[in-house]
Amino acid sequence: MKNIQRKPIWFFAILLFAGIACQQSVPAAIPTLQSSVFDSNHTAYGFFPTPVEVSLQAVFDIYKKMGQHADVVLMQREVPWKEFINSADSESKAIEDIHNQYILAHQNNLDVVFIVDPLNGLNRREFYNLPFGWKASFANPDIRAAITNFTLRVVREFRPAYLGLGSEINTYADTSPDDFPNYISLYEEIYSKVKAESPDTKVFVTFQWEEMNNLIPGLNPDRKAFEINWNQMEVFEPHLDVWAISSYPFIAFPTGADIPAKYYAPLLERTTKPLAVAEGGFPSIAKGNFPGSQQDQVDYLNAIHDQIGQGMDFWIYLILSDFNMEAYAKEMRKGGHSSDADTLSWFSKVGLMEMDGTPKPGLTVWDSFRK
């Protein structure tokens, strides 16, 4: 089966909408939540804030809909390299944008899971938007300083209950094994600094589950399928407060019903730490070599819930609603990202709602778990 990059949605949602909330008149202070799921013992259910259309109203609409079907929103942000190379206290448009998205989240009674992501969401082999001339390595002191300073600023401004310091990091480990130890040392340094300022913040990094199971064609030919590469995760211990994965099994299995009965269960057998699905999904329509149906979505949701549902702190499904791929592709061409439009289109039908708001069967299943 053809390999595809697994996570463009957050990238383009941020690209198109990170600053859009600033166009409205909003209170300066972030509203206090009526209640937070993090104050309970329940799993927090959530989505990426990906609008259906490229418009300000669509941003408001998706937050309102998420407020009806979720407890949290996942904010996954790239590093503003130049703004934070020297100090955590720099003036920053990125921080203003995050502030305004927190306002939208809290207005809809959504708490936040935050991930700082230095890598390209479309290609985990490379950093995202590095300044010209910067060496792409976690050994680069400028990269280490910018990531550290930005993370500390997020902690000081927003005190997130859950803070990720990278996404699907095992994909970078597989393609840049010489640099991976530099990431680990940076993670440990930032972990200690975050804990010094906010001891209750749970810190983690996410891992791509299909790749950890060696189910991506062409990668790690010396390992067998389902031979889980635990070392890539356990090397972070004891500095993982949560074991968090992403999972897009449609790249590995013909249907949702083909997900093995104990596919996710090894996580519970391997650790006593809380678990999380930090992103994932299954398309409701087949495209090319990749499967998809509404029943596949139901089977995918049930597989996660039945196998590890009792051990999860939070569960992020990629998007609540399908989105208008033509509108996104148009904006991508304007921004010079037209080559990525085909990749993005694979995920346009992953939502649990149609673009017009019609719920798919998977949404009823999702809501039943949440209740």
Image: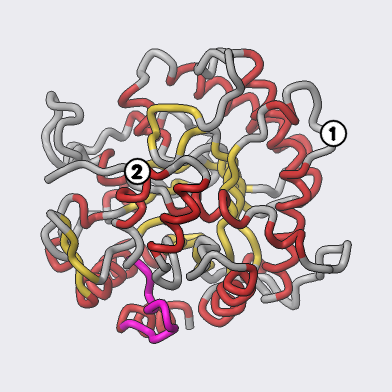
Give above or below for 193 relative to 185.
below
**Residue visible at 38% across and 70% down in the picture:** 351
Mark 1 or mark 2, earlier in chain: 1
**Residue visible at 58% across and 63% down in the picture:** 73
Residue where numbered disc 1 is placed:
89
Nearer to me, 245 or 25: 25
Nearer to me, 327 or 96: 327
Residue 289 image-quadrant placement: bottom left
Residue type at numbered disc 1: Asp
Q: Is there any visible trace of residue 276 in the rendered image?
A: no
Nearer to me, 100 or 335: 335
Q: Determine whether, in the image, residue 320 is placed left or right of residue 109.
A: left
Q: Write down the region rendered in magenta.
A: 350-360
Residue where numbered disc 2 is placed:
208
Residue 75, image x and y in percent?
59, 54
Q: Determine whether, in the image, residue 65 is placed left or right of residue 333.
A: right
**Residue visible at 33% across and 46% down in the picture:** 6
**Residue visible at 39% across and 33% down in the picture:** 124
